[in-house]
Image (cartoon, rainbow, N blue to C red):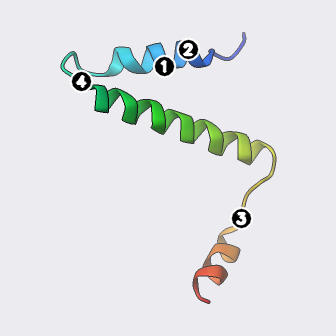
Amino acid sequence: MTAPTVKQRVIDALEQLPADASFEDVMERIYFLSKVQRGLEQLDRGEVVEHDEVKRRFLK
């Protein structure tokens, strides 16, 4: 089974929103899904920063 297309994921997300959702609600949901997908792709490529490294950077 193939992964759902972006279009299908957006349709699924829209169907989960309440009937009175605003355009802003729709855009926020799409933006959120986009950022989650980007993060998962970065994780798959190994583009991550370990927890200890994050702490070290913030303590500077």
First in sequence, mark 3 or 1: give its number.
Answer: 1
Label 4 belongs to which residue?
A: 21
Disc 1 crowd, CA 10 A, few/some/many (<14, 14-19, 20+) = some
Side of 36 relative to 27 (left or right): right
For the residues carrying marks 3 and 4, which lies nearer the camera in this image?
4
Q: Are marks 2 and 1 in contact (CB under 8 Å)?
A: yes
Q: For the residues marked 2 and 1, what is the alpha-carbon distance in whole angstroms?
A: 5 Å
Label 1 belongs to which residue?
A: 10
Disc 2 crowd, CA 10 A, few/some/many (<14, 14-19, 20+) = few
Note whether 56 is above or below 37 in the view shown.
below
| Amino acid at dot 4 | Ala
Q: x, y (%) of residue 39? A: 64, 45
Note whether 52 is above or below 32 in the view shown.
below
Note whether 56 is above or below 3 in the view shown.
below
Q: x, y (%) of residue 30? A: 45, 30
Q: x, y (%) of residue 50? A: 71, 67
Label 3 belongs to which residue?
A: 49
For the residues carrying marks 3 and 2, which lies nearer the camera in this image?
2
